Image: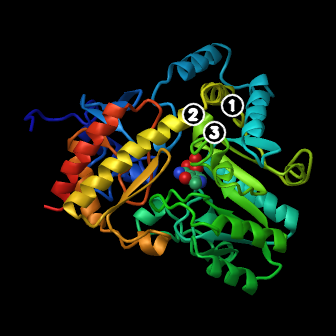
Amino acid sequence: MSQHVRDPGLASDSASLFERAERLMPGGVNSPVRAFRAVGGSPRFIDRGAGARVWDVDGREYIDYIGAWGPLLLGHAHPAIVSAVAAQVQKGTAYGAPTRLEVEMAETIVRSVPSIEMVRMVNSGTEATMAAVRVARGATGRSAVVKFAGCYHGHADGFLVKAGSGAATFGTPDSPGVTEGTARDTLTAHYNDVEDVRGVFAAQAGAIAAVIVEPVAGNMGLVPPAPGFLETLRELCTAEGTVLIFDEVITGFRLGSGGAQQHYGVLPDLTTLGKVIGGGLPVGAYGGRRDLMARVSPSGPIYQAGTLSGNPLAMAAGLAALRVIEEDLSLYARLDRLGAQLEEGLTSVIRRRDLPCRLVRLGSLWTLFFQDAEVRDWRDASTCDTTRFARYFRALLDRGILVAPSQFETNFISAAHSSADIGSTVQAIAEALEAAYA
Ligand code: PMP
């Protein structure tokens, strides 16, 4: 420990910054899971990133699997994104008037995502899901929305009912501040449990405006859909005149350029996007069937707007990312190979030591669950040994590997990770598991 007296006004190492931050911001952060509360210790403040790596303000280097929580499919500071943003910034950062970039972004999304015929850009995933539900309610004239326990759709009131991600991490899946009336309009069902969903539909016949689902759940840890689950949702929604919303904020342009809907061959009525399509800048989008999207203002009566929506810097960054992807779609096969390498390595470590954990992986998404039974829904995920997870996390951090600081999140491999990175990650995880189970 250094003996000098820290001037908290000036010191800028992670510990000092966090001391300053905690006095100024709730929990010292601008988004809860960043605070490391679920894993202990205090967060590392990041100074810079390049490719698959980040460096903290204390000069430590990490192989990064947070990837900004999903946007960084191409890694940190990808040259194409950096130069697109640099070029745009010279031309101004916002106009509040339409630009060519927005048209090109809409064309790219519509060309790539099978069910999207029209799209509206917003600034975050939260805005996208909020608006999509409003469209569903406006179009159907119904109020109720079905969501799944452990799924996270941003922090709008109606979604903070049995919510995943930080809400699950902090044990507040039902947030104070959400009115009873709002909570009443949100019906919940168990993920991957078609009988449960059928039961909800039977009890609320003709009243359900929308079913919103993460087609691959990423906010209770990674939980892929069981065979037939998405198909059943599609059938039920079609039969009942309910709008099916796929929240592809994580999976859009991540599982492939057509998202989970292309991967599983099930098409929703509306889709929400975010993360990858912004290239690391704040972006969300919602889109889908033309007859539904045509109801959005000003072509229709359902109101939704945004001062910085379609922001030129964000569009430049996102378009640069999507162009790199479109020009090299084999990128997804490469990501899958890296994912498979991680999966094989970790599965053999777990088997060799006979550890009670389970690696779940789909493409470049992965979660190491600290329990060994199959994880099909939040009931399963919530039985994980989060104390051991915290030990593993800290041991991994000490070895220069940064994963999501909560059991109930997914990790992201980027196109900037190399096979050697994955190799050293497997080695570090093997050691971290030794420490966690010592
Ligand atoms: N939907 C999903 C599936 C998400 O994972 C997230 C954020 N992790 C959101 C919506 C909300 O997006 P944002 O944080 O950009 O508001």
**Sequence-first tag of 2 and 1:** 2
Where does the image place residue 251, in percent across and percent down from the top left?
59, 48
**Mark 1 vs mark 3: in front:** 3
The C terminus - image quarter? bottom left
Residue position for label 1:
311
In the rendered image, which residue does mark 3 sit on? 283
Of residues 420 and 13, which is closer to you in this image?
420
Disc 2 crowd rating (10 Å Cα; few below 14, some 14-19, many 20+) is many
Task: Read off the residue under disc 2.
Answer: 281
Q: Quadrant of the N terminus?
A: top left
Q: Whole-percent x and y of residue 326?
A: 65, 29
Identified at 77% across, 59% down, the residue is 134
Is 357 rendered above or below residue 291?
below
Q: Are marks 2 and 1 in contact (CB under 8 Å)?
A: yes
In the rendering, at what x and y percent does residue 316 appear?
Answer: 65, 25
Callout 1 crowding tier (Cα within 10 Å): few <14, some 14–19, many ≥20: many
Looking at the picture, does residue 122 appear above or below residue 292? above
Nearer the observer, 134 or 346: 346
| Dots 2, 3 in contact, CB < 8 A | yes
Query: Around disc 3, counting alpha carbons within 10 Å, would you say few (fewer than 14), some (14 to 19), or many (20 or more)?
Result: many
